Image: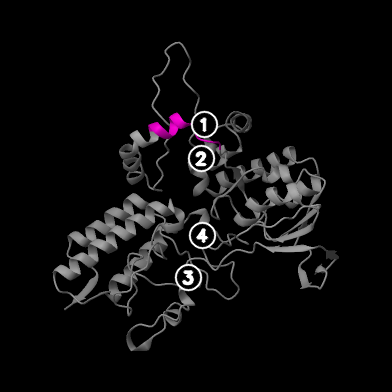
Amino acid sequence: WPRNGVDLTGKRVAIVGCGSSGVQAIPQIAKQAKQLIAFQRSPVYTFPARNAPMKPEFLAQAKKDYAEIRERQRNNEMGIANYNGPKKEADPNKPAKPKPSKKIMDITPEQRKQEIKDFGINVLSQYADTYFNREANEIACELYREYLRETLADPQKADALSPKNYPLHCKRPVIDTEYYAAFQRDNVSIVDLRATPVEEVTAKGLRTTQAEYEFDVLIYATGFDAMTGTIKRLNIRGRNNQLLADKWKDGPRMYMGLQSVGFPNFFTVTGPGSPSVVSNVLHSIEQHVEWIDACIAYLRKNHIKTIEPQPAAEDAWVEHVNKAAEGSMMTAPTCNSWYLGTNIEGKPRGFMPYLAGTKTYRQECEEVVAKGYEGFSLAS
């Protein structure tokens, strides 16, 4: 995005892609553009970010509670602190604040709708059984579609924006601010690329199988070749001049998500085989950097020149990562996401992050160190 910004006032704008980038950009573009057309391949499940300015007293208290916040992160399997400010003593004269149910299958259809009214649509992401139980997940999906039909005045827009063919939690959660409100505007329309695929970009705009569209500005929000795309393009070579891209042609193979056999002294941070993108990524980056820093210090202290995973350890870890994801919505047959690499044509399907959680993963990393860097070959 241009560093100095773009003035889209009065422009006819098209945006291709309605994933995380598109969801964030569309509400802002809609406020400026004369006309905005969103070209969408896959509708997303998105939940309100509910961001708000932080009051000075909240920030001051957060700084005082910093040690507690960090401890909460370390003890949460996603590395999230869930910090809501200073603790408040319960008022005995007021009834306790209600909490949503833990499982969607434990409550009636009427109770489910009431909880959406009480807690907002975000509540659908909190039911534990929707992550692994297909029936529970489909109930949540239909409630989400019903919410869209009730929220959007235009039934055609509601239908186009409704995810239908893949489960909730299949993809990385999309968080929005006024995304659906943008589609309530008269200057915003949507084109379903599943029904009418793009044929070509023209001198004046874009043509699909059914119509030709003219506009002044075209914005690509088409996503990323996540987790492996960039690193494979660096032409990294290991032993016997082997390219990392060649080794990973059938999918990434790593031990502990830290190193790959045949590439000594080459570490990755929050790469495949680690919690990375299914966690608080900043927390996971920090954990990796601290582990790598301590490892390098150990190697230097003991005059060790190389560290490299053992093939059997790498094979076992890849299998361990695959088993951790079994049965989750993220590996469902109808799920196609960048977690699996299926957003890139020709990329092999395979779940790349480690789903067991950051707390569990940290303990496993510490155990490897405690056992003398078990699974690694160290050579002087």
Instruction: Judge from the rendering whether residue 156 lies leftward or rightward of residue 317; answer left or right.
Output: right
308 to 71, vertically: above or below = below
- Mark 2 or 3: in front is 3
- x, y (%) of residue 318? 37, 68
Instruction: Judge from the rendering whether residue 33 lies leftward or rightward of residue 300; answer left or right.
Output: right
Q: Main secondary structure of the magenta part?
A: helix
Residue for badge 4: 331
- Kindly check if marks 1 and 2 are in contact, taking CB atoms under 8 A apart as contact: yes
Which residue sits at x=38%, y=47%? 77
Q: In the image, which disc is placed on residue 228?
A: 3
- Kindly check if marks 2 and 3 are in contact, taking CB atoms under 8 A apart as contact: no
Q: Earlier in the sequence, mark 1 or mark 2?
A: 1
Nearer to the camera, 27 or 277 = 27
Check disc 2: other Cα within 10 Å, few if <14, some if 14-19, many if 20+. Answer: some
Q: Earlier in the sequence, mark 4 or mark 2?
A: 2
Q: Earlier in the sequence, mark 1 or mark 4?
A: 1
Check disc 4: other Cα within 10 Å, few if <14, some if 14-19, many if 20+. Answer: many
Q: In the image, which disc is placed on residue 100?
A: 1
Q: Give me the C-alpha separation between circle 4 and circle 3.
A: 18 Å
In the rendered structure, does residue 233 fall within the stretch colored magenta?
no
Instruction: Judge from the rendering whether residue 314 lies leftward or rightward of residue 59; answer left or right.
Output: left
Identity, as a three-letter code, of the amino acid under mark 1: Pro
Magenta part of the chain:
52-61
- Mark 1 or 3: in front is 3
Q: Give me the C-alpha separation between circle 1 and circle 2.
A: 8 Å
Residue for badge 2: 126
Identity, as a three-letter code, of the amino acid under mark 3: Thr
Is residue 373 visible in the rendered image? The answer is no
